Amino acid sequence: MSNYVIGLDFGTNSCRSLIVDVETGKEVASHVFPYPSGKDGVIVDASDPNLARQNPADYLRGIEAAIKGALKKAKAAKKNFSSSNIIGIGVDTTGSSPMPVDANGQALCFDKKFRKNPAAMVWLWKDHTGYAEAAHITETAARTRPQYLGKIGGVYSSEWWWSKILHCKNTAPKVFEASYSWAEICDWITANLTGELHPKKMKRSICAAGHKAMFSTEWNGLPDVEFLEALSPGLGALRSRLYDEAYTSENRAGTLSKEWTKKLGLSPGVAVSIGAFDAHMGAVGAGIHTGTLVKIIGTSTCDIMIHPKTETLNDIPGVCGIVNGSVMSGYYGIEAGQSGVGDIFLWFVNNLVPDSYGKTQEKKFKELEAAARRLKPGESGLLALDWNNGNRTILVDTRLTGLLIGQTLHTKPHEIYRALIEATAFGALAIIDRIEEHGVAIRKVMNCGGLTSKNPLLMQIYADVTGRPMKISRSDQTPALGAAIFGAVAAGRKSGGYGSTEEAQKKMTGTGKVFMPVEANHFVYKKLYSLYKQLHDGFGTTDWNGGMHNVMKELLTTRDEVRKATSC
Amino acid sequence: MSNYVIGLDFGTNSCRSLIVDVETGKEVASHVFPYPSGKDGVIVDASDPNLARQNPADYLRGIEAAIKGALKKAKAAKKNFSSSNIIGIGVDTTGSSPMPVDANGQALCFDKKFRKNPAAMVWLWKDHTGYAEAAHITETAARTRPQYLGKIGGVYSSEWWWSKILHCKNTAPKVFEASYSWAEICDWITANLTGELHPKKMKRSICAAGHKAMFSTEWNGLPDVEFLEALSPGLGALRSRLYDEAYTSENRAGTLSKEWTKKLGLSPGVAVSIGAFDAHMGAVGAGIHTGTLVKIIGTSTCDIMIHPKTETLNDIPGVCGIVNGSVMSGYYGIEAGQSGVGDIFLWFVNNLVPDSYGKTQEKKFKELEAAARRLKPGESGLLALDWNNGNRTILVDTRLTGLLIGQTLHTKPHEIYRALIEATAFGALAIIDRIEEHGVAIRKVMNCGGLTSKNPLLMQIYADVTGRPMKISRSDQTPALGAAIFGAVAAGRKSGGYGSTEEAQKKMTGTGKVFMPVEANHFVYKKLYSLYKQLHDGFGTTDWNGGMHNVMKELLTTRDEVRKATSC
């Protein structure tokens, strides 16, 4: 009889449950529950595009519906499947997505008084209402606690924990005052599963705490009271009602509560592992280990590596997050990323592609890809920077923008589309180079996320630009698989799980398709990359002084050479 | 009884006849004759997009049809109009559009042997088949006759006289050998009208000869035999069968021949003035005088000024044509221009604007203009270079390309459209500044050409960017009006015409609409122009060394300030 684990993945619009065979990693069944509240699960405000909240009741309904749905499918698919062989549950969520809770750890918006108050709900990762507070935190830390900024690349984001809490304090003081504590949803959901909701007993994730809440053992946990008071008088008092410890996801948050065990029809004693963010768990589900860069490619990109704690790790300038244990116990987690990838393609297709390429977004993408695929590297004479949404890693600067160069009177949309894909590939290579230049070797690149399966042209271009094989994770649900893996580790060897994450990964993860670099393409891209780097350094740094006169001409020369070679 | 003159304007797709009242400049009637040959009058070759030829028979049919049509309309419109009161005819054409002729000056393609041979036809201005020959001419002149290049901005164009003749010699030697001489169509058409077709007696235009054929009194007319032989052995022999003199358009090519006088039903003795290119005659029709910059704005832009021969005129670096008498007798003609204006907008609308802006090109333009008009200067955060077709004036470099900077995930097509219009306005200002910096004051800017009446947003942006009133010529057929003016001058005072071009212009030209600059807009554009100049010098010259880091940030700062001011 096989043992199974459940990965619960809480996304922006829905949650997913994935049942995985512990021995083989085979994904037995999966069920998705779309959040019923708001617009596609997000509570928005027409008058403020920065606002994005969620109703935590959706998560509780989601746990039940998604797990029950998957169990039903598993039973239908596999005759000898039994719910009683579920040994562990892992949870990953979006983040930083904090919410205010009362003294019992209950969501403040469950209280009748606050039921319709968005400030009392979950402040979803993409809520940017706290942008002024973020700037204030960066500025205050730069002045008084530069060490806090050292770990996060120098800039505190409006997407993160303290920006949101401070904005709540500034704009919804009644909610702030009524809140006893705050919790990331990855912690609040596992706390619900174990039944231990008390804010001081609720087990907190080091992944969430690490950069988002500026938690570090180097300064005794969360930022000190004096600093919080300097941010806003009265904020300091919250510190003692938050947490002093944070844990890696191999640890148990606890055991599934009696109520949930009964409701879901499982056996008693199911382990619930500590929660974490989707990207970090996705990296584990993609089989991350020392020397492997995991790229999670979607609207933006998350690049994750791990580095053994036993080996030296120097600072990597411009890499925004290095947190001990944020991915796996025993390793530093290294987090980098590109602020815009799929989002740039979506912007282009939705705004600048005529209907001659197709009437729908899907058809336009298909036709663009077919036409772009027929182009040789360098053939269009175009070059772009991938900064439409700023630059997260290396330059760590949101006040950067897109750039397109080389257009003539004959430039076609599919040429620009290809140039935009290439720009994101050059951005990816710049991150790879930066990490390697600072002593962390990258021996394998493993890709996962929506675009890896949807866009083979993109993956081939990434292989050709980087000159490295681009491997695709066998699973296309790596965050849920990663959560399931932690469920198996939290269950432990005695219960039929694993003794370590590495051990679990060996059995439960694997490689799917591999895109091999084409040498002739890589040769041209090396030239284009040097021009990309010139624009990157020229527009992105203050220490470029070399002129730009060569850029257009070298693009035209490359174009002419490629066209000549192609026509021979 | 009024006297009248006829302006004949030979365009790319059709020719037009315009009958003008000599006393008032009133345009009495106009008639257009579309050329019957080829595709819209242009003989093309599907296998060679550079090829563009014309059938000279179309011009002869066009003279008759266009003049007869206009005379008929004039009689219908004005009871006391009489064909016998026509005193002069002027001719303007595209150029450089040379054609091979036999020893009688007849078109070689009128010979049965060459009837279907495109090499024996008119090599239309936009024929680029001689691009390799153009490079060879530039290279040879740079080595041995740098003075030839000094007058034309340093680069000989594939659109010009010698490139085409040399390409004919290289690729159609039988045609080259059978040709006794060559003629620009502006000279061949007037020769037809006067009946004096002999190549050595045919009166040649200084406007055409000036830069296109590298003719100058400084070196005794056309390039010397030795130079031509160096270009291609055997080419030198042609020189003595071409011409030694070239004339301004105030001069008579002759009197209308008996055959034409009869065919058209005119009185004997009608003066025919020397032909010239459309842009130069357009400048005269727009009322050019000392201190006035005439901008002819269409797919590209031609900027024309005149400077009295009696006053010093220094070289203006990067201004491609300074030719004595090319516009008017007694003045240096100064010719500058932008390689892409309307063409850039056409490229954008045809390639990068979705159908949500409209189903047709016309509707898209209309909706783009309406939406772009609602934007404030600087509001989009975008900035572009207008180099999609290279840079003709200042940088004189065809190997430059477009650039767009400042795009985010929210950038809309009408924002880019406005940025492209602004880019051409910045390019226009750069030319104005360049001319003034070298001692030629610009006291008035007069605009004509298709886009001035079709695109009021463009004209307002030009006013706001330059901080100068943009005046629009009263006539919207300025090349034909300019030709008519020269017809009146060639007729002379005694026949009821004028003693000088200035005198004729005073009566026959005028100003229509005026776009006044808005100070608040000019203030923002001054800021954006400094960034444009930075990109211009950075990407266009080798002497820029100042970094680019400020560009994106200043665009965002300006954008944020404008948006803040707008929302207050």
Image (cartoon, coloured by chain):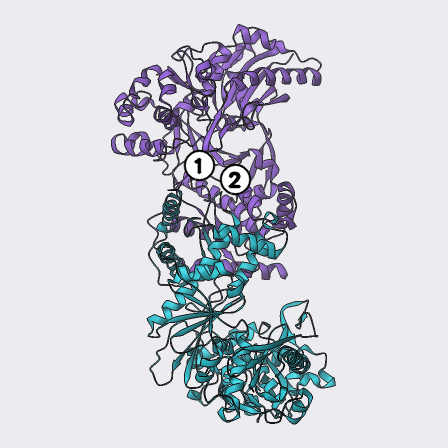
Chain colours: A purple, B cyan
Q: In which quarter of the view is residue B520 placed?
A: bottom left
A268 to A275, vertically: above or below? above
- Depth order, front residue of A410/A311: A410
- Residue B95: percent from left, percent from top: 55, 77
Residue type (three-letter) at the residue carrying disc 2: Asp
- SS type, badge 2: helix
Per the rendering, the mark at residue A77 is: none
Q: Are marks 2 and 1 on the same chain?
A: yes
Q: Amino acid at mark 1?
A: Ala
Is any atom of residue B27 visible in this view? Answer: yes
Q: Quadrant of the N terminus of chain A?
A: top right
Q: Do the CB atoms of the residues marked 2 and 1 lie less than 8 Å apart?
A: no
Q: Is residue A139 left or right of residue B126?
A: left
Host chain of mark 1: A
Q: Foreground: A547 or A330?
A: A547
- Between discs 2 and 1, the one toward the N terminus: 2
Name which residue lies at 54% across and 54% down: A378
| Residue A492 seen in the figure | no
Judging by the rendered image, the residue that carries numbered circle 2 is: A343
Provide the residue designation for mark 1. A441
With respect to residue B193, does A152 lie above or below? above
- Judging from the image, mark 2 belongs to the subunit labelled A
Residues A68 and B555: in front is B555
Q: Nearer the viewer, residue A221 or A434?
A: A221
Task: Tell me residue A52's x, y (percent).
Answer: 47, 29
Whole-angstrom CA distance, mark 2 to mark 1, is: 29 Å
- Residue that extends furthest to the right in the rendered view of this protein: B112
Residue B37 in the image, given as x and y percentages of width and height: 70, 75
